[in-house]
Image (spheres, rainbow, N blue to C red):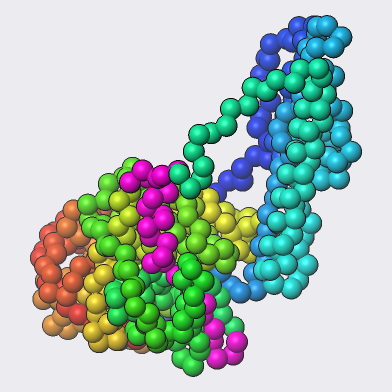
């Protein structure tokens, strides 16, 4: 499943580094080692979307500045692709006695000629396009490619070592004193944190009544068997479908949907027969996260369960609009944590951890490269722009879903445009969905004196640059909260307090 919105263009990376300028001349008696590296909808929205008007829904295009969303929910049919580059550099000989250094291996060994284009070790390796037939075939091809490359390197090293093994029978090899069983991971290390968290992270296989589905991730929320994940991971199985959860030890359990929040892109499912000894992951405080903090992401990218990647918090409060790829035509909004930890299709719903192993977010979206991913499959991979729902918001939504089965959204009772229209802010629409009032009579915005055409530029201290940004910021609050809204009317700036109302359920 892939979900996308418009986003800024990402320039293609060069296929090879540029040649250096004015490189120094190489002495005639020396040689150099060569290398050649081988929508917007709204939770409730009228013609643009709503920052809080009840009872409206629609699919609209996201603003041009919004990060593009690729739901990290790997379709079951998506092939896996891999590419491997030949090792960089070729051995070179030095002048000296005839028997030392020994002769080097051929510059183009026979086992290195079949894996690339061009010539020499540095040639790029281009895998063949995988044949139709599912992800498994693509994965096998990738494993074989890696095995062939490893074999080539091993052969070259063996040849060179054999030539060196003349009359000298001594060895300078030093054995490590510790066996693998003796190696201990320091508390707080990535290895220790991942090892502690993996038993509480699950791979989710969702299948609709028609047999379609895909793979995502989730994590244990409580000892009763509730699993927290993304709505778009389980949406296909919500009505008449099947859910299966697999733990890191390989044990599988049937599950069912407890509740879904399309606007938040959060869902809670529950194991039908929860085992004893479930270990919920500890929840952190996403409000206290700082840019530069270390992150650990765990998930099943392209179906590869129990994958651990690391990075940092790249930004906070990043406005992200996403859709579920056309399943419902509705969009979700988040004021996201941005991370450069590698996140790919299949990571959706998995935990984003801090260095202590506490959950600070739910991995939900990526901004993919415009090329469409490896092999032209249409499924993009990570370019270091991943987005996670802050855990404070996710926890609040999860508790609502467990308690009532439906979400509750804070609203201001005004429809806003979801597209940039030459203004730097969120413009209250002239008309609501189906010709309704853009500002709900006697609603929060109406009571505060807001009118159609007003341009909202700030919510508390947060700058608002579009309708989706406004919605995402409102949804970080709870119904009943009072927020300060700054808006422009007729070229003059005004500030008012607005007490948020509420809307129950997705509509």
Query: Splitting the image into 4 quarters, where does residue 479 fall?
Result: bottom left
**Residue range highlighted in magenta:** 183-211
**Whole-percent x, y for residue 108 in the image:** 86, 32
Whether residue 98 sits left or right of residue 327 in the image: it is: right
Q: In this image, 97 relative to 437: left or right?
A: right
Q: Quadrant of the C terminus?
A: bottom left
The residue closer to the viewer here, 278 or 4, is 278
Q: Residue furthest right?
A: 110
In the picture shown, does residue 182 fall above or below 456? Answer: above
Residue at point 79%, 23% (across, down): 165
Where residue 259 appears, as percent x and y from the top left, is 34, 84
108 is higher (above) or lower (below) than 320: above
Reply yes or no: does residue 201 show up in magenta. Answer: yes
Residue at image position (86%, 34%) is: 109
Name the residue rendered at 38%, 50% in the picture: 192
- The answer to whether residue 74 is above or below residue 150 is below
Q: Is residue 295 left or right of residue 375?
A: left
Direction front: furthest residue: 169
Q: Is residue 281 visible?
A: yes
Disc tally is 0
Residue at (49, 78) in percent of width and height:
252
> Image check: 130 left or right of 328?
right
Q: Report if residue 322 is visible in the image.
A: no
Residue 396, position as x, y percentages in the image: 23, 72
Looking at the rendering, in which quadrant would you find the N terminus? bottom right
Q: Nearer the viewer, residue 117 or 197?
A: 197
Splitting the image into 4 quarters, where does residue 166 fall?
top right
């Amino acid at each position: 499943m892939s979900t996308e919105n418009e986003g800024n263009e990402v320039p293609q990376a060069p296929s090879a580094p540029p040649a250096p300028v004015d490189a120094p001349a190489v002495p005639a008696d020396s040689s150099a080692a060569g290398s050649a590296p081988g929508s917007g909808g709204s939770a409730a929205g009228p013609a643009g979307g709503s920052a809080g008007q009840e009872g409206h829904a629609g699919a609209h295009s996201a603003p041009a500045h919004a990060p593009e969303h690729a739901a990290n929910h790997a379709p079951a049919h998506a092939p896996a692709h891999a590419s491997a580059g030949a090792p960089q550099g070729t051995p070179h000989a030095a002048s000296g006695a005839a028997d030392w250094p020994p002769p080097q291996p051929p510059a183009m060994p026979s086992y290195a000629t079949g894996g690339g284009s061009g010539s020499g070790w540095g040639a790029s390796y281009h895998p063949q396009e995988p044949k139709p037939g599912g992800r498994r075939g693509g994965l096998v091809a990738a494993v074989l490619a890696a095995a062939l490359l490893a074999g080539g390197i091993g052969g070259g090293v063996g040849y060179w070592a054999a030539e060196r093994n003349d009359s000298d029978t001594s060895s300078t090899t030093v054995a490590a004193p510790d066996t693998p069983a003796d190696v201990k991971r320091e508390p707080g290390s990535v290895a220790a944190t991942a090892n502690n968290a993996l038993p509480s992270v699950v791979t989710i296989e969702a299948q609709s009544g028609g047999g379609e589905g895909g793979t995502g991730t989730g994590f244990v929320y409580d000892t009763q068997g509730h699993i927290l994940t993304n709505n778009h991971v389980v949406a296909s199985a919500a009505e008449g479908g099947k859910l299966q959860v697999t733990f890191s030890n390989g044990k599988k359990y049937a599950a069912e949907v407890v509740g879904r929040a399309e606007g938040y892109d959060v869902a809670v499912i529950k194991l039908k027969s929860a085992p004893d000894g479930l270990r919920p992951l500890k929840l952190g405080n996403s409000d206290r996260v700082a840019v530069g903090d270390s992150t650990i992401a765990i998930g099943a990218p392209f179906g590869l369960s129990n994958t651990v990647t690391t990075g940092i918090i790249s930004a906070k409060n990043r406005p992200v609009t996403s859709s579920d790829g056309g399943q419902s035509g509705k969009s979700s909004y988040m004021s996201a944590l941005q991370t450069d930890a590698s996140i790919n299709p299949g990571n959706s719903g998995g935990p984003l951890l801090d260095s202590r192993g506490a959950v600070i977010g739910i991995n939900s979206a990526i901004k993919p490269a415009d090329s469409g991913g490896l092999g032209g499959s249409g499924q993009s991979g990570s370019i270091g722009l991943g987005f996670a729902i802050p855990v404070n918001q996710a926890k609040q939504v999860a508790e609502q879903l467990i308690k009532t089965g439906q979400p509750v959204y804070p609203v201001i009772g005004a429809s806003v445009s979801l597209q940039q229209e030459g203004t730097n802010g969120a413009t209250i629409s002239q008309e609501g969905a189906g010709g309704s009032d853009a500002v709900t009579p006697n609603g929060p915005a109406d009571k505060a004196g807001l009118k159609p055409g007003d341009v909202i530029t700030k919510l508390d201290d947060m700058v608002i640059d579009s309708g989706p940004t406004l919605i995402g910021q409102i949804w970080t609050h709870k119904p009943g909260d009072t927020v300060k809204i700054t808006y422009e009317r007729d070229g003059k700036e005004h500030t008012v307090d607005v007490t948020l109302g509420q809307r129950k359920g997705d509509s």
